[in-house]
Image (cartoon, helix red, strand yellow):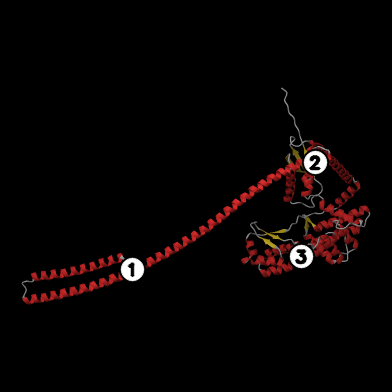
Amino acid sequence: MAFDLSLLFSSGASVGLTVGIGIGALVIGAVIGYFVNHSVTNKTIGNAKQTATQMINDAISKAKTLEKEAILESRETIHKERLEFDKEVKDRRTELQRAEQRIQQKEETLDKKEAALDKKSDSVENFKKELAERDKKLTEKQAQVDAAHDTMISELEKISQMTKDEAKTMLVASIEDEAKRDAAKMVREIEAQAKDEADKKAKDIVSVAVQRCAVDHSAEITVSVVNLPNDDMKGRIIGREGRNIRALENATGIDLIIDDTPEAVVLSGFDPVRREVARITLEKLIADGRIHPARIEEMVEKTRKELDAQIKETGESAMFEAGVFGLHPDIIKLLGRLKYRTSYGQNVLRHSIEVSHLAGTLAAELGANVELAKRAGLLHDIGKAVDHEVEGTHITIGADLAKKFKENKDVIHCIAAHHNDIEPQSVEAVLVQCADAISGSRPGARRESLENYVKRLEKLESIANSHPGVEKSFAIQAGREVRIMVKPEVVDDAGTIFLAKEVAKQIESEMDYPGQIKVNVVREMRSVEYAK
């Protein structure tokens, strides 16, 4: 408030000074005029006095007006300053109140945290006391257990009338008996294997059957590759906002993979017939050059009809190649569908024709029903044509299809028994089993992926290396043998026998593999000395 009054006083003083200066100037001007014009006539002097008086009055009036204006302006300025000062004071009071509220909230929060910390501190102290009491009780119980254990050992020695060393000796003896029994079992297995391998007649039949049958096998998988004339064709296949590729995928049910592979498009799908329809359709569209949704749907429908005719022709060709006649037309179509089905990289149609030839050859050698064996061999995997559409195993599906199309009951039995799902009741059923095994297991018929092969070898070596005393191990003979090198200072000669048994049991429990795996433990002891 003091600031505002000083401003008022300073403004009034400036106005009074201005008025005084004006009046002084007028007076001085009048005196100078008087002296200068002294010689002028009285009339002139009178007029000058009157003019001077008028000028003085005007100056006084003007000075009063200026003084009033200055006072009004000063009052207005003081009023504005006062309003601003009041607003500033009000804002500062509001800010101080907010600050006080925040400080009060922080103090309350700190009080709560302090109370929580005090509570936690009390809990921690109580927990420490409980732990100390538990530790004390555990120590007492451990002492009781140790005493009870010593008492139990003494009682057992009294009851059994044997010392601890004598019990160990008896245990070792029982382990040796178990090892001998396992050795006898192994001898029997080796003898049975030698007997099987020495069966000359079976060897002759298999060799004759394999010699008479030689077919080509294609490595077909779940993808097909379509080559493009140039990379610009990828954009046309995709279409504006992807409409072409969506139309093709919806019409065929196959996924199109368009990536950075130069001049190629990958078709992916588990249904081989649909994948073939998509492949042929895409090749025709590329050759035609007109690629749009309407043209795609038209071409897919046309390709389906053409492929159905090809499937029927393929089934008839397979029937004539195998020398089997009188099949139901729907069975012939299912045979044609097998052309687009693979199993472990082996084409199922070529496999079925091969099994038909093999079964017929085996039946001829043994004097069985050749026609029945060939027919059952050709149809034994017919369920794989629709196993992705119908629930159940391909064996059950195939037997049901054979029943549906009025096949011979002996053929149905061979189909149902070719994987030992049921016990074979005829020679022909056994021959179909043998022919199926020969076709699937001969070198080159099927292949295992490199990744699975490497994983199996790594698993064998990791199992061997997990046992103490093993220096290094090698999986050899394509995973049919694992050779283990042990540290002679850790594992003795008797320990190698037990190590081989443990590794073999672990392999049996943790791995799936065909045939058998040989576990070979090698212990080498070298002693070197120099004569001086």
Residue 514 spot, x, y in % from top left: 80, 49
Give the spatial CA distance, label 1 vs label 3.
Answer: 99 Å
Q: State the residue position of label 1.
A: 82
- Left or right for 435, reference 114: right
Residue 140: tell me if it is visible.
yes
- Left or right for 75, reference 460: left
Q: Earlier in the sequence, mark 2 or mark 1?
A: 1
Give the spatial CA distance, label 3 vs label 2.
Answer: 85 Å
Q: Nearer the viewer, mark 2 or mark 1?
A: 2
Q: State the residue position of label 2.
A: 155
Residue 307 - label: 3
The C terminus is located in which quarter?
Answer: top right
Contact (Cβ within 8 Å) of mark 1 with mark 3: no
Q: Nearer the viewer, mark 3 or mark 2?
A: 2
The N terminus is located in which quarter?
Answer: bottom left
Location of residue 164 (image quadrant): top right
Residue 499: tell me if it is visible.
no
Q: Earlier in the sequence, mark 1 or mark 3?
A: 1
- Is the residue 169 above or below the residue 353 in the image? above
Q: Earlier in the sequence, mark 3 or mark 2?
A: 2
Residue 33 spot, x, y in % from top left: 10, 70
Contact (Cβ within 8 Å) of mark 2 with mark 1: no
- Seen as rendered, the residue at the extreme right is 367
Q: Nearer the viewer, residue 95 or 478?
A: 95
